[in-house]
Image (tube, rainbow, N blue to C red):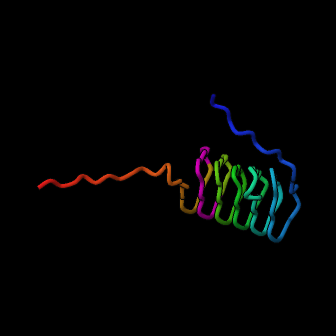
Amino acid sequence: MFAKKKQPPIKSLIAQGSQIEGFLRFTDGLRIDGEVMGDIRANPEQPSILVISETATVNGEIHADHVIINGNVNGPVHAGELLELQPKARIHGDVHYKALEMHQGAMIAGQLCPIVSEQEKPTLKLAASSA
């Protein structure tokens, strides 16, 4: 009845002590424990999950369906479905999300920008004035 969507498996890891410079594209799931200098983008045609651990630093733009952050991000974050900010998350940039889960201690230096679809927007009805 209230079944959750099945999460894609995490198939890739950028280990602690590793540093990557440049554009990074991934499918399914990616966990980052090291440092990435560049944009990270999930394949938009498949469900995706990105985990940024407390030892990780990302300097660039992030795009994925489900984003879990417990490290440092310098750049905007775009979570198409869910953005989870764990206690040690530090974001310097705007965050775009459909749903947000933020734990005590997480910090955002930027704007919170919820993604609202046309079906979810409240309708505005103006009362007709009668003379």
SS majority, magenta: strand
Q: Is residue 37 left or right of residue 1?
A: right
Taking the view exactly as shown, the residue that stands out farthest to the left is: 131
Check the picture and name the quadrant holding the N terminus. top right
Q: Is residue 29 left or right of residue 103?
A: right
Say which residue appears at 59% left-offset and 47% top-offset.
Answer: 99
- Across and down, in percent, residue 67 comes to 70, 51
Taking the view exactly as shown, the residue that stands out farthest to the top is: 1
Q: How many callouts does the rendering have?
A: 0
- Across and down, in percent, residue 31 comes to 81, 52
- Across and down, in percent, residue 108 comes to 59, 57
Position of residue 84 relative to residue 26, above or below, is: above
Residue closer to the observer: 76 or 91: 76
Residue closer to the observer: 111 or 87: 111
Position of residue 98 relative to residue 77, above or below, is: above
Is 97 colored magenta in this rendering? Answer: yes
Taking the view exactly as shown, the residue that stands out farthest to the bottom is: 22
- Across and down, in percent, residue 4 comes to 68, 36
Say which residue appears at 60% left-offset and 54% top-offset.
Answer: 97
Say which residue appears at 65% left-offset and 47% top-offset.
Answer: 84
Is 111 colored magenta in this rendering? Answer: no
Residue closer to the observer: 97 or 74: 97
Say which residue appears at 88% left-offset and 59% top-offset.
Answer: 17
The part of the chain drawn in magenta is 91-105
Quarter of the rendering containing residue 32: bottom right
Quarter of the rendering containing residue 76: bottom right
Check the picture and name the quadrant holding the C terminus. bottom left
